[in-house]
Each structure stands twice: as structure tokens, then as C-alpha cells.
Image: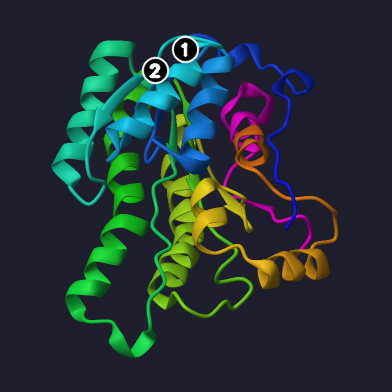
């Protein structure tokens, strides 16, 4: 089994434009989302984030506080739209209008095509697509007041690679690209940029515990163009660039991080 390590953040870019800005991250209490929260804190940003697991969120807060401003954790279920909207309002009232939204929350729980019910389908959409739309809707007015902003929607290569075992999840993730392109045109006149960040197989604790086995290791070795493994910080680093003024003329795009698999 390959050893998976995080990257040394000291070796990577610093973005002055992110210092002091308010950032909101959905699903930031663990995994990729947690690494994104810490990465923005390291840039000096004020971060609000949601998640269900208060215990793992406390670890994210501790990691972020060690390198930057202490983030604001607001416990909520992403399928609860009013709770999500309230978390966004609370973040804006506490930290200032939100300049950056990272729509990270998702659940890639495996499911069988023939076993999916209407209720099951709706729940999977409610966690993998619906929060992205309503979170974006909720930050628009604040971004207009700021004179612009950035929205980063997390996608997935699951649908690009025609992966089996989670058809509703893959459908939602493909729809994320459509959401990004639609919002980019809707909001561009207000200098609000919208992009998709599409990870491949990222070595989070969840993936390593539940899905990565010897066959998975072989698949990565055979299909990735680059050696090594992709970690959450690799995704966070691109989220920083897409949120900073350095990418001021970049919008409606889809950026894939999969070591060249697809």
C-alpha cells in the first residue's frame, strides 16, 4: 500500500488579495473541505464553514487557528437549505460580506442503479447539487456590494471517467459544470467569477478507509500520468488561485486535478 502524505504549504504561493477577505466553505469539517478551510486561513482570510461533525470540525478549527485567523464553524446539514442560508447570513454578519464561496459539500456514497428510489434520488441531489445553487444565490448580494467575488464549485471526475457504482452522484457532479457556466454568465457583469474545480481520486481519510485497496492502488499507478497520490492540499491550492485576484479574468472554466487520469 502506498504511503500518502500531505504537501508542505511553505513551498506554495501566497496571495495578498485573499488576506482579510471573508470566505465561506460548505462541507468544511473534514476531508478536502477541511484542507480548503486551513489553506484560506493560512492566507489570512476570515473563513466561515459548515459541516455536520462538530468533533472533526474542531480539529479543522485547531489546524486553521495555528496558521491564521480562527475560522467560524456553523454546524448544519447541507440538505437543510434554510439552515445553510442562515449559516451564510451569520458568517456575513460576523465576518463581513462573503467574497469567496467554495461549494465543496458532497456525498459519494455508493448506490445501485436499480435500488434507487424517488426519495433516495432526491436526497442525493439535495446534498450533491442543491446546496451549490442556494449557497451561490445567498452570497450574490454581498458580492455585489463588494464589487465582485469568486465562486468555486467542486466537481468530480466520476462522470468524466464513466465510473460505475454511484449514478446519481455522477449525474449531480456533471450538472455542476452546467451550473458553473450558467452562473458565470448570470453574474459576470457584477465581476463575480464562477469556476468548477474537478478533483480525481483524492486520498482523504474517508477514501483511504472505505475505498482505497490494492486494486485501487494499482489503478492509480496504471492510469495516472504522474506518480504519487493526490491529496486535499492539491485541491486547496487551486481553490486559492481561483479565488484570488490573480485569476481575475478566469471564469466559466472547469479545472481537473487527477494527475492526468482522464
Query: Is 244 in front, or is 159?
Result: 159
Residue 208 is situated, as x and y percent measured from the top left of the image, at: 57, 54
Report if residue 162 lies within the magenta region.
no
- Segment tinted magenta in the rendering: 238-262
Near-viewer residue (45 or 1): 1
Left or right of 201, for residue 228: right
> Residue at the spot x=60%, y=41% of the render?
232
For the point 79% across and 21% down, the residue is: 11
Relative horizontal placement of residue 71, taking residue 88 as reference (left or right) = right
Numbered mark located on residue 137 in the image: none
> Between disc 2 and disc 1, whose residue precedes?
1
Residue 247: within the magenta?
Answer: yes
Depth check, front residue: 87 or 217: 217
Nearer to me, 38 or 126? 38
Q: Residue 140 falls in which quadrant of the image?
A: top left
Residue 48 point in image, percent of width and height: 35, 23
Asked whether the beta carbons under mark 2 and mark 1 sit within 8 Å of each other, the answer is: yes
Query: 10 Å neighbourhood of mark 2: few (<14), some, or many (≥20)?
Result: many
Taking the view exactly as shown, the residue that stands out farthest to the left is 82
Tell me the quarter of the image containing the N terminus.
Answer: bottom right
Vertical placement of 95 versus 119: above or below?
A: above
Q: Quadrant of residue 108?
A: bottom left
Looking at the rendered structure, the secondary structure element under dot 2 is loop
Percent from the top left, x then y, of residue 57? 36, 30
Residue indicated by mark 2: 71
Q: Residue at x 85, y 55 (%)?
A: 226
Toward which corner of the image does residue 243 lie, by quadrant? top right
- Residue under label 1: 65
User: Picture coordinates of residue 19 (x, y %)?
Assistant: 55, 10
Residue lying farthest bottom? 114
Amino acid at each position: 500500500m502506498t504511503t500518502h502524505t500531505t504537501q508542505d504549504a511553505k513551498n506554495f504561493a501566497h496571495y495578498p488579495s485573499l488576506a482579510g477577505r471573508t470566505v465561506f466553505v460548505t462541507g468544511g469539517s473534514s476531508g478536502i473541505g477541511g484542507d480548503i478551510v486551513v489553506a484560506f486561513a493560512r492566507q489570512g482570510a476570515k473563513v466561515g464553514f459548515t459541516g455536520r461533525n462538530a468533533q472533526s470540525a474542531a480539529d479543522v478549527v485547531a489546524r486553521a487557528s495555528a496558521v491564521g485567523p480562527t475560522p467560524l464553524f456553523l454546524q448544519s446539514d447541507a440538505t437543510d437549505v434554510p439552515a445553510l442560508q442562515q449559516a451564510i447570513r451569520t458568517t456575513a454578519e460576523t465576518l463581513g460580506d462573503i467574497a469567496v464561496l467554495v461549494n465543496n459539500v458532497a456525498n459519494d456514497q455508493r448506490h445501485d442503479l436499480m435500488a434507487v428510489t424517488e426519495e433516495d434520488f432526491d436526497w442525493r441531489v439535495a446534498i450533491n447539487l442543491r446546496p451549490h445553487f442556494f449557497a451561490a444565490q445567498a452570497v450574490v448580494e454581498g458580492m455585489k456590494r463588494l464589487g465582485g467575488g469568486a465562486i468555486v464549485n467542486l466537481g468530480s471526475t466520476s462522470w468524466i471517467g464513466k465510473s460505475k457504482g454511484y449514478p446519481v452522484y455522477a449525474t449531480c457532479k456533471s450538472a455542476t459544470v452546467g451550473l458553473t457556466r450558467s452562473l458565470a454568465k448570470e453574474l459576470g457583469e457584477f465581476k463575480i467569477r464562477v469556476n468548477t474545480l474537478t478533483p480525481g481520486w483524492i486520498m482523504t481519510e474517508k477514501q483511504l478507509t472505505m475505498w482505497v485497496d490494492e486494486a485501487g492502488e494499482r489503478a492509480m499507478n496504471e492510469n495516472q500520468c504522474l506518480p504519487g497520490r493526490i491529496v486535499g492540499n492539491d485541491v486547496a491550492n487551486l481553490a486559492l488561485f481561483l479565488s484570488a485576484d490573480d485569476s481575475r479574468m478566469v471564469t466559466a472554466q472547469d479545472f481537473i486535478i487527477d494527475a492526468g487520469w482522464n
